[in-house]
Image (cartoon, coloured by chain):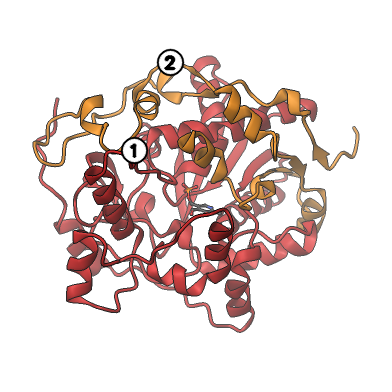
Amino acid sequence: MTDTVKYVLDESRIPKAWYNLQADLPKPLPPVLHPGTKQPVGPDDLAPLFPMELIMQEVTRERDVPIPGPVRDVYRQWRPAPLYRARRLEKALQTPARIYYKYEGVSPAGSHKPNTAVPQAF
Amino acid sequence: MVRVSYDQKPYRRALMETYGAKCIPSPSNLTNAGRTILAKRPDHPGSLGIAISEAVEIAAQNDDTKYALGSVLNHVLLHQTIIGIESMEQLEMAGDYPDIIVGCTGGGSNFAGIAFPFIGAQLRSGKKVDVIAVEPAACPSLTRGRYAYDFGDTAHLTPLTKMHTLGSTFTPPGFHAGGLRYHGMAPMVSHLQELGLIRSTAYHQTKVFDAGVQFARAEGIVPAPEANHAVRGAIDEAIRCREEGTSRAILFNLCGHGHFDMQAYIDYFGGKLKDLNYDESELAMALAGLPSVAEPA
Ligand SMILES: Cc1ncc(COP(=O)(O)O)c(C=O)c1O
C-alpha cells in the first residue's frame, strides 16, 4: 500500500471520446415531445435552438462520441482533473471506508461547467 | 443571469464579463417572457425557468443565435462523462473500484458525469455500484417530485420531457445553492431512478454546510455549496461504514470550489441559514399545473 493523495493523469490521457449511456440502457428514454403538438420531436424541430451537431449528440445511441480535437486542446488547459484520496477526512471520521473525490474546481470557472461550455461553444 | 444571482454574486458576474460576456439580469425587458413577468411583479427575483424562457425566445427568433445550457439535456450530460472516464482510470492507478458513488443534483449533469461511465460498466459487465444522488430538501425534484412530462421553462417554450419535476411554475426558495434551484431533473437521471439503477436522498442546508466545513478543515479545499451536498452524502456513507465495520470505496464528485460563495459560508457561521421545508400544499399546487399529455406507447 502506498499513501498517495492525488492521482494525476498525464495530458496525453485526456479521453478521446465521451461515454453515452444511451447505448447501454436496458430500456430507451421516453421521447421528447413538441410543446404545441405534443407529438415526438425530430431533429429539425430543435434546429432553431441548437446547432445540428449537438442535436445529433442529444439523440445518438452510439456508445463512444468522439471529442473534437480543438475541444480536447482547450480541455488541456485544466484537464485531466485530479482524483484525490481523502486520507485526512477518513482519519477525521475514523472510518474504514476509502473515500475518493474527483476535483472539478481546477477549471477556469471553478466548477465542472466548462466541460460542456467549451464543446457547446465549439 | 437570474436576478438574485446578478445582485448577490457580483464576482461571478465580473468573471463572465472578464471573458467578454454581457450579462443581463432576468427577468428582463428584452423578451415577451420577461416583460410578462415584470408587468406582474417589477421586482421579481427571477428563476432558472424564467431565464431559460428568455434565452430560448431569443434563440428561436434569431438565425444567428443558439441556446447554450448548463445541464439537464442528454448532450450536456454526455460532455460531463469525461469526469467519470478519467476517474475510472485514476482509480485503476489506485488499484481500487468504487462500491458507492455520490453526486449532487441540480439539473443532473455533474452527477451524470461521475456516475454514468460506472453505471454503463455495471450494465455491460455486472460490476455493481450503489449510486446516490443528493439534492436539497428545499428543491427535492427526485425525492418528492412527480415523474411526468413537463416543460423545462416557465413560459412553456421548450419541448416537453419526461422527468422528475416539481412543476415548471415552481419558484424555489432562496437557499444557498443556486445551482441546485431548478424545478426539473435530467430525463436521463430520472429514467435511471425509475429503472432502479440509482437512488436519491435530500438534506437540509445546515447539515450540508456542516459537512462542507468539516471537509474543508480536513482536506483544505472549500467546496461550492452545491458540492457540499455530495460531501454530506459521502460522509454519511463513510460513517455508515464505520458503524457497520466495513471498508467500502466511496467516490464522490467535488464539482466546484466555493470561492465565489463565501457569503453563504458567512451566513452559515452567523447562524443565518434557514432550513426551508417545501410545503406539501405548495407542491401539490405546482404539480396541478403539469401539462396533460397522452403518453405515447
Ligand atoms: C458548482 C455547481 N454544482 C452543481 C450545479 C448543479 O448542476 P448539475 O446538477 O447539472 O451538475 C451547479 C450549477 O449551477 C454548479 O454551479
Say whether residue B148 is visible. no
Which amino acid lies under the numbered mark 2 shown in the image of this protein? Glu
Q: Which chain is the one coloured orange?
A: A
The reply to whether the residue tagged 1 has its Cβ within 8 angstroms of ligand 1 is: no
Q: Which chain is the one coloured red?
A: B
Q: Name the residue rendered at 54%, 32% in the picture.
A: B81
Q: B206 or B171: which is nearer to us?
A: B171
Q: Chain of mark 1?
A: B
Please determine whether, in this image, residue B72 is positioned above or below residue B118.
below
Question: In the visual, does B84 lie left or right of B281?
Answer: right
Q: Could you classify mark 2 by the number of other residues whose Cα lies within 10 Å: few (under 14), some (14-19), or many (20 or more)?
A: few
Q: Which mark is residue A62?
A: 2
Work out which quarter of the rendered image holds the C terminus of chain B and state it: top left
Which amino acid lies under the numbered mark 1 shown in the image of this protein? Pro
Question: In the visual, does B112 lie left or right of B259?
Answer: left
Mark in front: 2 vs 1 = 2
Quarter where residue B246 is shown: top right
Q: Could you classify mark 1 by the number of other residues whose Cα lies within 10 Å: few (under 14), some (14-19), or many (20 or more)?
A: many
Q: Name the residue rendered at 70%, 61% in the picture.
A: B222
Q: Looking at the picture, do discs 2 and 1 lie on one chain?
A: no
In the displayed orientation, state which residue is furthest to the right: A2
Q: Which mark is residue B187?
A: 1
Quarter where residue B277 is shown: bottom left
Q: CA distance from mark 2 to mark 1?
A: 18 Å
- The spot of residue A78 in percent (x, y) is 70, 40
Please determine whether, in this image, residue B132 is positioned above or below residue B155.
above
